[in-house]
Amino acid sequence: MKRITLFLSLLLLLLIGVLTGCGAKESSGESENKKRESYIDQIKKKDKITIGIFTDKPPFGYVNEKGENDGFEIALAKRITKDLLGDENQVEFIPVEPANRIPYLQSDKVDLILANMTVTDERKEAVDFTNPYLKVAIQLLVKDSSDIQSIDDLKGKKVIVTKGTTADIFFTKNYPDIELEKYDQVTESFQALKDDRGAAYVNDNLLLFDLARETPGFKVVNEKLEDPSPIAPAVKKGNKDLETWVNEEFEKLSKEGYLLELYDQYLKEAFGDNVKNPADVIVEGEWK
């Protein structure tokens, strides 16, 4: 009888453990579901989304003559805000520099980075990217009088980069023998080239096309230093809720042709003959 009683007691304890475990798993699953749903809910509750943008990088993000944020990415950010919160004015724009985009996400200063951020393997270790909206390659901007025709001509010369850009990362990693002149902002970097503090300014070609068009006496060297890479919004590592929402939003905008509308409005004139077809720079859908 004692053995039977002991056996039944052990069996009861085992059943309680199994049920408790199942309950814990269900509770954990429910918490995880709530966690996945909570970030969008949190944005809606505060009725505001904070987006990191550039203020000195036309035609993508800049301050216009009225003192207002303007550009391709600004318009895209406003549309995202409108579709998420019902009013494009419910966005708080946070000016960022290339080097502080990731720290701003990691420290929750912004919900989303929409500031010409090229997707790289190194950056993917620190943040998560949504599907892209543009593709870009690194090229050289030089004065018209320069005889530089390729990266091989930079040996023994100083090269200007903006801190934290893919150009900065590319040269630091692949060409440690080339001396870099580093600046925080695009405007500072371009001014350094004007002042002959370096033989070339290296950055995303989409930016350089506009600088060359707007400023007589400068040209973009034809050579692409790397294969084209995607530019995409970035979210804090693990924020699948916002990442998924943005991907679904981009899918909808692509079906509307909205990105091509923004291209015509902000990029077509800026790129001129450097871009023959919008499909050469606009990405609609996942990166292939």
Image: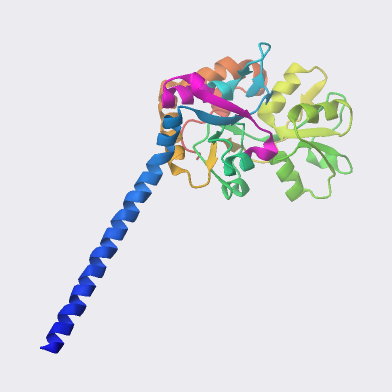
Secondary structure mostly seen in the magenta stretch: helix
Q: In the visual, does 223 lie left or right of 256?
A: right
Q: In the visual, does 198 lie left or right of 230?
A: right
Quick check: can you spot residue 190? yes
Q: Residue at x 66, y 14 (%)?
A: 67
Range of residues picked out in magenta? 76-101
The image quarter containing residue 184 is top right
Q: Residue at x 23, y 73 (%)?
A: 14
Quick check: can you spot residue 59? no
The image quarter containing residue 150 is top right
| Residue nearer the viewer, 47 or 64 | 47
Residue 191 at what x, y percent from top left?
Answer: 83, 26
| Residue nearer the viewer, 158 or 219 | 158
Q: Is residue 82 magenta?
A: yes
Looking at this view, name the residue that lies furthest to the left: 1
Q: Residue at x 61, y 39 (%)?
A: 104
Indicate the quadrant containing the N terminus: top left, top right, bottom left or bottom right: bottom left
Residue 187 at what x, y percent from top left?
Answer: 77, 26
Q: In the visual, does 126 lie left or right of 193?
A: left
